Image (cartoon, rainbow, N blue to C red):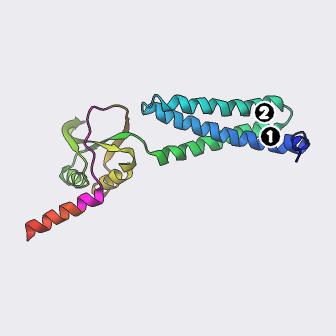
Amino acid sequence: MDFVPLFNSEFFSLVMIPVFIFLARILDVSMGTVRIIFISKGMRYLAPVIGFFEILVWLFAISQIMLNLTNPLNYIAYAGGFALGTFIGMLIEEMLAMGYLSVIITTSKDPAEMVGKLDLAGYKITVVDTQGGTKDRKMIFVIIKRDKLRNVINIIKEVDANVFYAVENVKDMHEIHLPPDYTARKKFLLQKFRRKAA
């Protein structure tokens, strides 16, 4: 089957080229987001590989625009692909959930309950005395895997819905103690408590 007439047709130029540009921009912008994540996490070998394929896809998209400057759909496809690629890249970043986070909690209340619940979940906590304004406060530090953030925030809000907390990325660290599986730890602590009660 001869595809040359199809490639040279007006339909291919007006419709298919914009579609290819749109898809190429989605792909290269999404790859760019992943590359930036790898750079921020110190993955110095994977980031250049992603960058290599990212720029290849971008060159394809921009070359098609330069070859078809008279079709306004190409410009719309280029911009639309960039916008959707940015959104998809954000979704990929959430799904990957790579690396570690530092959660800093500041409270003027007794932190015993919050510390106890975080400890029960297996997180290692550091508590320091601070002062803010005229009040003495407690500052709680905890390092977690990125995919555990929602669980930690739920614990924080369960104890104090109005407490102040901040979350920061952790790029490098010397040593860390991460919690085991939360369900398994909870079962272990319950069994230990029952044995003591018996």
Q: How many C-alpha atoms fall within 10 Å of the one at disc 2: few (<14), some, or many (≥20)?
A: some
At 37% from the left and 32% from the top, the residue drawn is 171
1 and 2 marks in contact (CB < 8 Å): yes
Give the percent coordinates (x, y) of residue 86. Answer: 60, 41
Nearest the camera: 184 or 132?
Answer: 184
User: Which amino acid, mark 1?
Assistant: Ile
Considering every residue shown, the one lying at the far bottom of the view is 198
Q: How many marks?
A: 2
Which residue is the site of mark 2? 64
Q: Which residues are magenta?
A: 173-186
Which is more N-terminal, label 2 or label 1? 1
Residue 94 relative to residue 178: left or right: right
Nearest the camera: 50 or 144?
Answer: 50
Of helix, strand and loop, which one carries label 2? helix
Q: How many C-alpha atoms fall within 10 Å of the one at disc 1: few (<14), some, or many (≥20)?
A: many
User: Which amino acid, mark 2?
Assistant: Gln
From the viewer's perspective, is residue 166 above or below residue 69? Answer: below
From the viewer's perspective, is residue 1 above or below residue 38? Answer: below
Q: Residue 5 colored magenta? A: no
Residue 159 lies in what quarter of the image? bottom left
Gap in Å between the C-alphas at discs 1 and 2?
7 Å
Which residue is the site of mark 1? 17
* Dominant secondary structure of the residues highlighted in magenta in the image: loop
Give the percent coordinates (x, y) of residue 179. Answer: 27, 49
Q: Residue 175 colored magenta? A: yes
